[in-house]
Amino acid sequence: MNRIQLLLLFTLLALIQIGCHRSNQVFISQEMLSEGDLVFRRGSSVKSQAVLYADKSGKYSHIGIVVKEGEEFMVVHITPGERAPEETVDKIKMESLEEFFASDKAKKGAILRFTDLPECSQQAAQYAKMFFEKEILFDHDYDLNDTTKMYCSELVWRSYLKAGRDVSEQRRSEVTRLPVFSGTYVFPSDIYQNERLTIIYEF
């Protein structure tokens, strides 16, 4: 086998690997989604590892909520460090599911749904869009008492709370082991543990 054939073979194998990796994460049809679905991901960044270290019972480090924008389903979420080039502050985002689950952001992921709460879920999605339109900033203090800024699980929790449902079921996570990150929080795991949630998709 000559050098050109070897190069073509390695290129083909690389493309197959990329294709398999992408299909594992982003092959999610619009038909399988509904407004108010909850999307969870486990990242590999330092901030993701910090969340998982603080939340010992956590499987995922980040959460968002599915909304419908025109004919497309999108994800509304809020996270630090993912600014557009023109942005100077961390604020709420609306992006495609493919972008939310991009391989450089998500090692694992899942979509969950309250199958018995369709109206509440739709209302929660509308409140999430309202928060997006208000351009809510990320809350670097992680203060649940401050409703002018939010962190990821707070955004989802507040969207459903305004629709009449406490999706955390009053669960709170107490963190005392980290000097720069201690207090009472709603973590993604506090929502994930809700037994009314059904897994729609995971990888």
Image: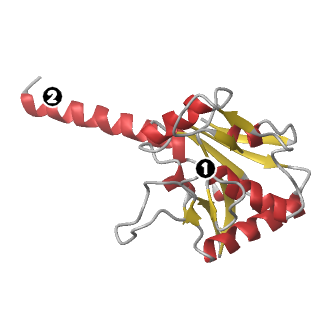
Residue visible at 58% across and 42% down? 41
Q: Which residue carries the number 2 mark?
A: 6
Residue visible at 76% across and 59% down? 158
User: How far is disc 2 from disc 1 in space, using C-alphas?
Assistant: 34 Å
Q: Quadrant of the N terminus?
A: top left
Q: In this orientation, which residue lies closer to the viewer: 35 or 17?
A: 35
In the image: residue 168, left or right of residue 203: right
Q: Which of marks 2 and 1 is in front?
A: 1
Residue visible at 45% across and 36% down? 44
Amino acid on which the number 2 mark rests in the picture: Leu
Q: In this orientation, which residue lies closer to the viewer: 94 or 54?
A: 54
The secondary structure type at the circle numbered 2 is helix
Residue 28, label in figure: 1
In the displayed image of the protein, which residue is found farthest to the front? 179
Q: Earlier in the sequence, mark 2 or mark 1?
A: 2
Residue visible at 82% across and 49% down? 167
